[in-house]
Amino acid sequence: MLPSYSVFYLELVDAVARQDGGVASLFVKSGNQFARVDTNATKDNGSRALGGRVRRSRITRGEEPIHDASGDVIGIYATGYVKPSAPR
C-alpha cells in the first residue's frame, strides 16, 4: 500500500514528464534495497510500475540520493529516458 502522501509525489513525477519528457521515479530505502513508491513509468498494461526495486533497465537515467536531516540516505530520486532499441 502506498503512503497517503503519494498523490503529491505522483503529481511531481508527472510534472517532470510533462516538462522534460522521460521517466521520473522516487524510491525509499527498505532494508538494504530501495523500493519504487512513485513513478510515471508504466507496465505493459498501462498501470504505474510501483513497487519495483532499483535495477538495471532499458532506461538511461541519473540518480540522486535523498538524505534525512542527519545525512543518512533514505531514498533515491531518478529521472531518465527509454533507450532506443538496438537495430537487428
Image: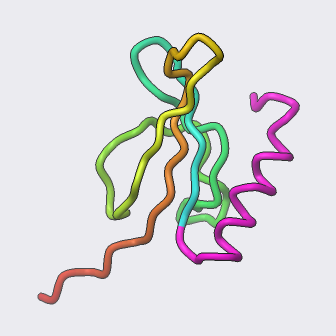
Dominant secondary structure, magenta: helix
Magenta part of the chain: 1-22
Q: Residue furthest bottom?
A: 87
Q: Residue furthest left?
A: 88
Q: Position of residue 73 (x, y in %)?
A: 50, 21
Name the residue at 66% across, 66% down. Answer: 16
Name the foreground residue: 65 vs 50: 65
Name the foreground residue: 37 vs 64: 64
Q: Position of residue 37 (x, y in %)?
A: 64, 37
Name the residue at 85% across, 46% down. Answer: 7
Name the foreground residue: 66 vs 53: 66
User: Is 56 on the left-hand or right-hand side of 77?
Assistant: left
Compared with residue 27, is residue 9 higher up or lower down, i.e. above or below? below
User: Is 65 on the left-hand or right-hand side of 1?
Assistant: left
Compared with residue 80, is residue 78 higher up or lower down, i.e. above or below? above
Name the residue at 12% across, 88% down. Answer: 88
Compared with residue 63, is residue 13 higher up or lower down, i.e. above or below? below
Q: Quadrant of residue 66?
A: top right
Q: In this figure, what is the number of numbered marks?
A: 0
Name the residue at 53% across, 16% down. Answer: 71
Colour style of the rendered protein structure = rainbow
User: Is 75 on the left-hand or right-hand side of 2?
Assistant: left
Q: Position of residue 6 (x, y in %)?
A: 80, 39
Q: Quadrant of residue 15?
A: bottom right
Quadrant (top left, top right, bottom left, bottom right) of the N terminus:
top right
Q: Position of residue 87 (x, y in %)?
A: 16, 89
Q: Is residue 32 magenta?
A: no
Q: Is residue 3 magenta?
A: yes
